[in-house]
Amino acid sequence: MASRAPKPVSRPEGASWFKRIKLFREDMFSSQPAKLYRAWMAEARGPFYRSFLVNDPQLVKQVLVDEKPDYPKSEIIGDTLAPLLGRSVFVTNGSVWERQRRIINPAFDGSLKSSFPAMVTAAEAAVDRLAEQADGRDVEMEYVTSHLAADVIFRTLFSIPISTEIAAEVFDEFRTYQRAQPLWNLPGLLRLPAWMPRFHSAQSRRSAARIRVLLSELVANRSAEIIAGTAPDDLATRIMTTPDPQTGAKFTAEEMVDQVAIFFLAGHETSASALAWALYLLASDPDVQDRVAAEVATSAAPAFEEISRFRFTRDVFRETLRLYPPVPMMVREAAMDSEMRGRKVAKGSLVIVSPWHLQRHERLWQKPDEFDPDRWLRVENKTCQRDAYLPFSKGPRVCVGAGFAMVEGVLLLSMLVRAFRFETTEETPVPVAHLTVRAKDGVKLRVSARGPDTT
């Protein structure tokens, strides 16, 4: 029988605005009503804003794919993350975003296979570290997966392990920043006037500033290596040496720091979140975990060509991304007056696409809160897989690292499950929306070594 995946308790119907704001400050998920898991569209109004959450797959396609210029990315996320991300590709629109993608896309093309050995080395180091704790004790897995995902990013982006002093400090500061910075700031979400402060916490500002100093040092070092002809052929080198095909201009040092910050945030945070939840779901369903272990048993460190045969492990990871999409909501803004499902959507309104609600929608998915990797093989789910599954967004702004993330996720999951058995503890993790979908008090699992006869 499929296991039920934890989700937060929805806010009570009829809650006052004071109660809603209080819940939002604690956790965005808990501040939302249960009806959003059934609604095709929902409207919310406040003194300074009007927003529409859309779950209708046709409206999602309209917003993200068909009419992209009509629904640019809202400045809310940019306001929230500006101290860290500056003007990175994650927050820009229009010609600035188009130029950034013209430079970034070619750098990622063909990089997956060449980056794969670095992923394997990072996973092997993680297995060695976890082996020291794999004696049946409880382990906080979010720290383990964060450390591993950060190691992958440093090795593939800058060809350095996380044990390097500067890499270790960036990792520590990112963990501090992640705990201090919510996904959205409330003044921005409520569309309060621009002159009102956005209340970035002192800790998040300090961490963001320190991270950017460290990333600037890495970028400067790499720039010197490029000039000297000694730079390794990794992602950082490719991005820094790729010119805009239209203008011939490359990223400035400041622009490169912006991009590295989002690569680290997106590549590290999202992978760490997804991997921790995948291990929890496998621990909750020992039969599924044993199926993964049997599939990967013969490959201690698989070659790139072998990953494609781990089909069930891939479906486990896809199902994890359905239940716990790392980025739970995508916020766009209507650039002109329009109409959706008979309602007027005024220019300036927020239009929110929520993978969290769409991928657990009760009128789209069968038993949406159950962890069921086999659903990816059933014909009745093909429409949902096409129209109601977007952990990496879709359309022109689809995540440039989506393919990278899928290969990374399957590889890391396969190597961890081959080496260890994971069991649940008495603590059930509660999802909360920070920068990504994390567990309120971490994901604690009991870890033991998996012997050759225990698969």
Image (cartoon, rainbow, N blue to C red):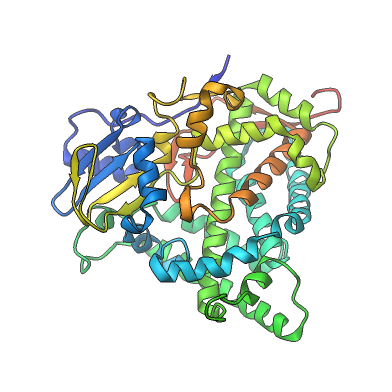
**Image coordinates for residue 10, horizontal then vertical, percent:** 32, 30
Specify whether residue 176 is in view. yes
Horizontal side of residue 325 vs 163, given as left or right: left
Q: Residue furthest top?
A: 1
Foreground of the two, 397 or 178: 397
Horizontal side of residue 119 vs 195, given as left or right: right
Foreground of the two, 6 or 42: 42
Horizontal side of residue 366 vs 311, given as left or right: left
**Image coordinates for residue 1, horizontal then vertical, percent:** 58, 14
**Image coordinates for residue 349, horizontal then vertical, percent:** 23, 52
Q: Is residue 364 above or below residue 150?
A: above
**Residue appearing at x 43%, y 43% in the figure:** 328
**Residue appearing at x 59%, y 59% in the figure:** 171
**Residue appearing at x 71%, y 66% in the figure:** 234
Specify whether residue 86 is in view. no
**Image coordinates for residue 200, horizontal then vertical, percent:** 34, 62
Q: Residue furthest bottom?
A: 228
Foreground of the two, 188 or 362: 362
Q: Quadrant of residue 153?
A: bottom right
Q: Is residue 115 above or below residue 2?
A: below
Q: Residue furthest left?
A: 47
Q: Is residue 278 above or below residue 369?
A: below
Q: Quadrant of the C terminus?
A: top right
Q: Is residue 298 above or below residue 265?
A: above
How many labels, in total? 0
**Residue appearing at x 71%, y 61% in the figure:** 155
